[in-house]
Image: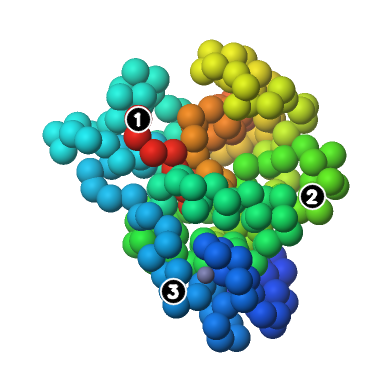
Amino acid sequence: MKESIINKCVAGLVESLYPRRCPACDGLTDKMGELICDKCRNAFSAVRSPFCFMCGKEIGEETEEYCRDCRRNPKPFVRNYALFNYDETARASVMRFKNGGRREYAGYYAGELLRRFGGEINKDNFDIIIPVPVTPAKKRDRGYNQAAILAKEICRATGIPVREDILIKTGDTVQQKELGRESRRRNLRGVFRSTMKLNRGIRILLVDDVYTTGSTLSACALALMRAGASRPRSATVFVGMRE
Ligand SMILES: [Zn+2]
Ligand SMILES: [Zn+2]
């Protein structure tokens, strides 16, 4: 591992000295260094086969390669590695991770993501990890960008460097959940931008906590492609459940 990579990953180490909260029930974990309590080991619902080879959502039809949404609206990213279904437990967990200061959940999220997709991610030979950015104002409010914390944990385990300086979010958007699909897309157009020209050959892994409609990840992928990169891949801890 190169020295520069080690430095970038060091931020996550400090947190492991403190007792952690369980990402499922938010109680203190049983043992020091434990990332989840014993009774919660199966609290999150893992995405099962068959799943969509584009967005990672579970699908009903064994014979289909992509879900209905991805067949109708193909995504600009190649594939999303998605770990858990975004059910009630997941929603509550993400809320605390994002807005409640529970950064330590990232250790469990990233560890499980790599336990499931580490082989694929290794084979993909990524050059860099790019977390889905938030606006500077949002980062000031929350104190951190949860996707970046997650990305750093993945970096710590894989050695793939995190770059937070490439993709930036410039404008704020109307609350996405209040909008329909077409307006979501319009709402996000021009909001993400690359700060530099990118090499076509660069292999990028985009990282975010949740995939719902895919509009945010799509907008990020398009911004990177406008800067010259080819289609990136992505990884999210949670993915919306099939309709
Ligand atoms: Zn628990
Ligand atoms: Zn899909």
Kind of residue at disc 1: Glu
Which picture quadrant has residue 18? bottom right
Q: Which residue is mark 2?
A: 142
- For label 3, the crowd category at 10 Å Cα-Cα, with few meaning under 14, some 14 to 19 and many 20 or more, is few
Q: CA distance from mark 2 to mark 1?
A: 32 Å
Kindly report which numbered mark, 2 or 1, lies closer to the viewer in this rendering: 1
Crowding near the residue tagged with mark 1, few <14, some 14–19, many ≥20 C-alpha atoms within 10 Å: few
Question: Does dot 2 land on a helix, a strand or a loop?
Answer: helix
Name the amino acid, label 2: Arg
3 over 69 or under it: above or below: below
Question: Which kind of residue does numbered mark 3 sit on?
Answer: Lys
Quadrant containing the C terminus in the rendered view: top left
Residue 39, numbered circle: 3
Percent coordinates x, y for residue 212 in the rendering: 49, 35
Q: Which residue is nearer to you in this view: 209 or 38?
A: 38
Q: Quadrant of the N terminus?
A: bottom right
Counting labels gives: 3
Given contact means CB atoms under 8 Å apart, are the residues at marks 2 and 1 in contact? no
Residue 203 seen from this side: no
Q: What kind of element bears circle 1?
A: loop
The percent position of residue 111, horizontal first and vertical second, equals: 48, 67
Name the residue located 63 percent from the left edge and 61 percent from the top edge: 152
Which numbered disc flags the more N-terminal residue, 1 or 3? 3
Q: Hey, which quadrant is residue 50 in on the image?
A: top left
Asked whether residue 238 is in view, the answer is yes
